[in-house]
Amino acid sequence: MKNFIITTGAVILIVTIMSYQFQCNRLLREKQQLKYVADEAAATAALCFDEVSFGEGRLLFDRKRAMKKAEQIIAYNLQNSKLIWKISFADQDVQRPSVTITIEKDRLKIMSKYDYLPY
């Protein structure tokens, strides 16, 4: 009887540890996927400059086109996912314009900032 109780306790302990490990691995993979999508969307949106302003030597984003492109990247990579995403532009009176995308899904919140660095 003593062997049965010890074996049952060991099995319960191992099952608990394995379920915790599976949950952590699932969240890690989901976080990595969200980070990848946020990075890609920010980089894509940062390429959408207003052509008239760019011709005048100012780096201003075409916000409508950038939001549309970022939404396409997010929708393509995260199909059937319920999430909230936000985009913010920093292109007024700054030396390096940047795009920041925040994606929130359940308890995960991922932020990616892409700075435009002219060469």
Image (cartoon, rainbow, N blue to C red):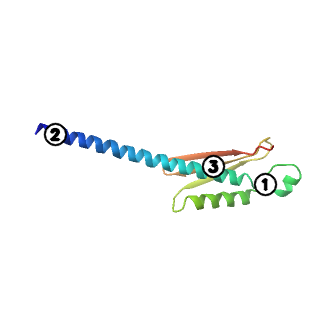
Left or right of residue 48, residue 5 in this image: left
Identify residue for label 1. 49
The alpha-carbon separation of the residues under discs 3 and 1 comes to: 18 Å
**Do residues under tags 3 and 1 come within 8 Å of each other at their CB atoms?**
no
Amino acid carrying mark 2 in the image: Ile
Amino acid carrying mark 3 in the image: Asp
User: Residue 91's x, y, as percent?
Assistant: 77, 47
User: Residue 82's x, y, as percent?
Assistant: 51, 58
Q: Mark 3: few, some, or many residues within 10 Å (few <14, many ≥20)? A: many
Left or right of residue 37, residue 54 in this image: right
Q: Which residue is pictured at 69% across the width and 51% down the height? A: 43
Q: Work out which quarter of the rendered image holds the C terminus and state it.
A: top right
The answer to which of marks 2 and 3 sits earlier in the sequence is 2
Residue at disc 2, secondary structure: helix
Q: Which residue is pictured at 54% across the width and 62% down the height? A: 79
The alpha-carbon separation of the residues under discs 2 and 3 comes to: 51 Å
Query: For residue 39, which numbered disc appears in the image?
Result: 3
**Do residues under tags 2 and 1 come within 8 Å of each other at their CB atoms?**
no
